[in-house]
Amino acid sequence: MPAYILAIDQGTTGTTALLVARDLSIRSRATVDFPQHFPQPGWVEHDPEEIWASVRQAIARVLAEGDVSARHIAAIGITNQRETTLLWERASGRAVHPAIVWQCRRSAEICRELRQRGVEELFRHRTGLVLDPYFSGTKLTWIFRGHPDLRRRAETGEVAFGTVDTFLTWRLSGGKAHVTDPSNASRTLLMNLETLDWDSQLCTLLDVPPIILPGIADSSAIYGYTAGLDLLPDGIPIAGIAGDQQAALFGQACFAAGEAKCTYGTGAFLLENTGTQIVRSGHGLLTTVAWRLNGQACYALEGSAFIAGAAVQWLRDGLGLVRTSAEIEPLAASVADSGGVVFVPALTGLGAPHWKSGARGSISGITRGTTAAHLARATLEGIALQIYDLAAAMEQDRGDMLKLLKVDGGAANNNLLMQLQADLLGLPVVRPATVETTALGAAMLAGLGVGFWSGQRELEESWREECRFAPRREVPWREDLLQRWHEAVAKA
């Protein structure tokens, strides 16, 4: 009898595969890195074949390391870097253009043109998003403007579009399934939040032929079956799809409105479940689809800090303050506070709720007594302060305070950072027993799609807490730090 769900977490710098058992334990894990390409400043690309090769290698390794036969896989779940944009030939499956990565800024001028045309509010209302190069739609506009031949082929249906989930499902199913789910579709600037379908007016504004778009299915459903692969047998259901941040929300069992999680990776992403209610932000957040199950959509508010763990990497690689990222915690903990130093980690601009693309990182409050330890602590504070701003914006939009924050991602293993976060928010911060919540969420969705689990209640009961950080600081400490932080952000 099939005993595991295979979860594929296709990320920006690598692909992770997990084998997840019925009790949500991890039988085995494998990660395969792949290159990023930077053809010119501000541009970020992936080679779709390198993405696919990393997926194949990760699957092969996770099966080998778990000593598990592929016959024991009940279903496959996919989670992915969300806004990265791919085009391929329907006939051959061959990519016809490099994948344009979510980080890429090449369509900034197209966004400016659209704002000048006065359509930003239309996009915001229909999609819950802002006009920013981050999202897939303007990346497609850029491709078609520069490659009229691809535009013509798109009009005839020869070329298919997809985010990474769609591309992988196509490849795994032998080209039989061209599908996405609402969590990924809601990141394209092309899907209407209310109808959960592609919006013809937005397609026209972005010059995207609707014929290239995938079907939009539930986040937990059988989209197709493996076919024609040399590493997996035919007939394994592909049964779960969600964008990485929504998958992490699901993997944290944040199934009820008002529950929230924050993923601390290269950047940090705070999502709050708003249930069946579409909450349109008035404070710089994004409204997005969390998932759709049995035809019922669940929505979320999202705020993203572009730089989180990447700030620690900069201290390591750019300044040489530490040799490994893990050294940042003991260094920062060696001082009682940051000594008045404030680090605004706007190394690639500021995301929500500020949306200041021209902002630059700044370090202020330096004195003769400032040490590497003070800068290290200010870096952790800067990460936590960005999340405070996001949580404050969510409180203003929802009119209700968070009661608890679940955390995951690599930087969530930093106990000092998590304690600072709890102190700033004034609420408990909870780290789960399994921090691979993005892949876990994809596995949960796939398992629900094939009856591997009976329902969300069973999953909620299986979710386990590993550590809880309770607030320790008094209000004056928080107010002083916030005042200095907001003064520094205003100047960034």
Image (cartoon, rainbow, N blue to C red):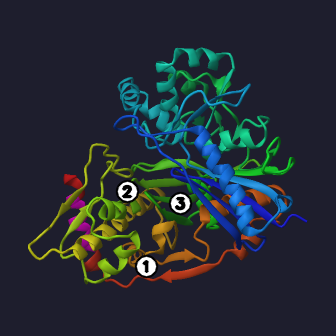
Nearer-N-terminus badge (1/2): 2
Task: Write down the residue under mark 1.
Answer: 415
Side (left or right) of 145 relative to 369? right
Task: Reply yes or no: does residue 100 show up in magenta.
Answer: no
How many marks do you count on the picture?
3
Q: Quadrant of residue 321?
A: bottom left
Type of secondary structure dominating the magenta stretch: helix
Where is residue 16 shown, x and y percent of the image?
62, 58
Above-or-below relation of 167 to 491 = above
Side (left or right) of 376 relative to 291? left
Above-or-below relation of 249 to 380 = above
Nearer-N-terminus badge (3/1): 3
Task: Write down the residue under mark 3.
Answer: 272
Side (left or right) of 159 relative to 484? right
Q: Disc 3 or disc 2, which is closer to the eye?
A: 2
Where is residue 171 shown, x and y percent of the image?
72, 40
- Give the amino acid type for the residue marked by disc 3 in the picture: Glu
- Give the amino acid type for the residue marked by disc 2 in the picture: Ile
- Which residue is nearer to you in this view: 343 or 17? 17
- Give the amino acid type for the residue marked by disc 1 in the picture: Asn
The answer for how far apart the CA atoms under marks 3 and 1 are is: 23 Å
Bounds of the magenta span?
479-488
Q: Residues within 10 Å of mark 3 (few under 14, many from 20)?
A: many
Q: Residue at (85%, 62%) from the top-left corner?
A: 72
- Which residue is nearer to you in this view: 256 or 432? 432
Task: Write down the residue under mark 2.
Answer: 307
Q: Residue furthest right?
A: 1
Q: Residue at (74%, 68%) from the top-left corner?
A: 66
Q: Quadrant of residue 185?
A: top right
Where is residue 478 shown, x and y percent of the image?
29, 75
**Can you see residue 195?**
yes
Q: Quadrant of the N terminus?
A: bottom right
